[in-house]
Amino acid sequence: MFSSMHNPSSAYTQVGVETGVTAANPHKLILMLFDGALMALGTATHAMQQNLIAEKGQAISKAIDIIINGLKVSLSSDDTSGLSEKLAALYDYMADRLLSANLKNDKKIIEEVSGLLRELRGAWEEIARDPAVVSGSRRAA
């Protein structure tokens, strides 16, 4: 907590994130998780290009954490369509691929997972534009 006192911009960023989370509806929170995972993968790619091994590992770990403990955990347990089960399997696949990317130092795998996340984010953004979702009368998977 005290580290933000030494870096005022970090403190402002943290307040902005906390405010965004507090004000966000569930669909906005999911979009924020996608954005966080994509940013972490961007950091991992940059670190890989600069041969910054520790930073690459931290960024990939952060992306995996967001995918498994954010996106996967947020899936609806009362989904009877099977969509949540398929998404859970896809999130597990992404995490496994990212572990492989870290071990093999393979930028193409990170690009593959980033592409999947961007596609899912786009679909989620479309769902969030549905007036029934915005009003809260329809629940997402």
Image (tube, helix red, strand yellow):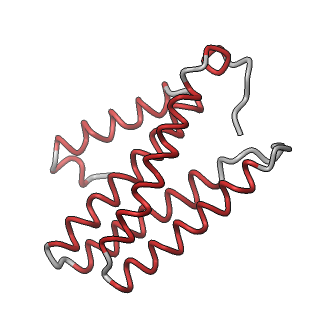
Q: Is residue 78 toward the left or the right of residue 66 in the image?
A: right
User: Dividing the picture into quarters, in which one does residue 45 lie?
Assistant: bottom left
Q: Residue at x 86, y 44 (%)?
A: 80
Where the C terminus falls, by quadrant?
Answer: top right
Q: Position of residue 110 (x, y in %)?
A: 37, 67
Query: Which of the two residues, 112 or 36, is positioned nearer the viewer here?
Result: 112
Q: Position of residue 109 (x, y in %)?
A: 39, 71
Q: Does residue 61 sit above or below 4 in this rendering?
A: below
Q: Does residue 42 sit above or below 35 in this rendering?
A: below
Q: Position of residue 102 (x, y in %)?
A: 37, 79
Q: Position of residue 33 (x, y in %)?
A: 48, 46
Q: Is residue 49 toward the left or the right of residue 85 in the image?
A: left
The residue furthest bottom is: 104
User: Dividing the picture into quarters, in which one does residue 136 lie?
Assistant: top right
Q: Residue at x 20, y 47 (%)?
A: 5
Q: Residue at x 61, y 67 (%)?
A: 92
Query: Which of the two residues, 65 or 4, is positioned nearer the viewer here?
Result: 65
Q: How many marks?
A: 0
Q: Residue at x 70, y 56 (%)?
A: 86
